[in-house]
Image: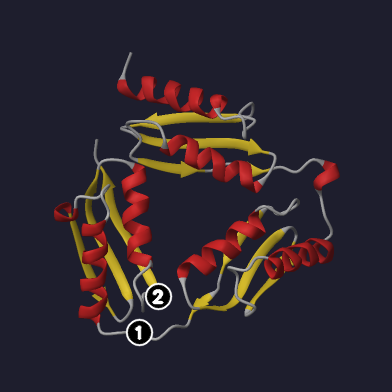
Amino acid sequence: MSFDTDLTADVTDELFWDPKLDSTEIAVSAADGKITMRGTVGSLRERREAQKAAQRVFGVISIDNQLQVKLMNDNKRADAELRGDVLQALMLDGLVPKTVDAKVEDGFVTLTGTANWQYERDEAEFVASNIVGTLDVFDKIELKHQTPGGGDVKDSIRKAFKRHAALDADDLQISTDDGIVTVEGTVSSWAEHDEAIDAAWAAPGVTSVRDDLEVVY
């Protein structure tokens, strides 16, 4: 059996193993370690859990998640009702700033407004994606905190990399341009990849992170 055949089987097994997923209608293919997932799932949360499950499999270097959310009739919602539930959930979450708003069209939620930190944007997106009836979430929240000097951003991120036990800072390169950070290099797992990107986002003044990391096993 080829590597890609084995990898396809491993990802398929991991999707089936995850109790949060119904993988019945998910098709998996692999090409040189690059996974493609096609088919349908019952919620946006399941689509994201499928992505996480595939990332857990050793040998996966990238994922093209083409899964589509197909709601059962009981879960279909009027846009006004869905927007009301999204806004209520955002309001009740202490990590989401009051400056965040939401619009809904045909089940697709668009988040707008402003936030000071990326984690606040991530939280708003997470909250909206868990509301029954949401087909997808588009995050258009703007980051508004003050931008420090490029050297300050680069230095603070590099120090954060060195503090993280899971990261080899010598394999990572950082460049900055007016709040835009590019992270390059290699990591040995998706967990390390996420650690590095999260660390870059945590630096004061970062408004965008370009992910040029490669997962190399």
Question: How far across and how far down the image is residue 45, in percent?
Answer: 62, 46
The kind of secondary structure element at disc 1 is loop
Q: Specify which label sits upstream in the sequence, 1 or 2.
A: 1
- Name the colour scheme: secondary structure
In this rendering, position of residue 57 left or right of residue 47: left
Task: Report how many numbered discs are placed on residues in the image.
Answer: 2
Up-down relation of residue 141 to residue 173 (above or below): below
Q: Which residue lies furthest to the top in this view?
A: 1
Q: Is residue 30 above or below residue 74?
A: above
Instruction: Give x and y (percent) for residue 23.
Output: 61, 29
User: Front-most of 108 and 201?
Assistant: 201
Pointers 1 and 2 in contact (C-beta within 8 Å): yes
Which residue is at 26% across, 41% downward? 188
Left or right of residue 34, residue 65 in this image: right
Where is residue 137 drawn, in percent x and y? 62, 59
* Residue in the image at 14% along x and 54% along y: 170
Question: Residue 107: which quarter of the image?
Answer: bottom right
Mark sitting on residue 207:
2
Residue farthest to the left, as pictured: 170
Q: Is mark 2 on a helix, strand or loop?
A: loop
Q: Residue at x 67, y 52 (%)?
A: 130
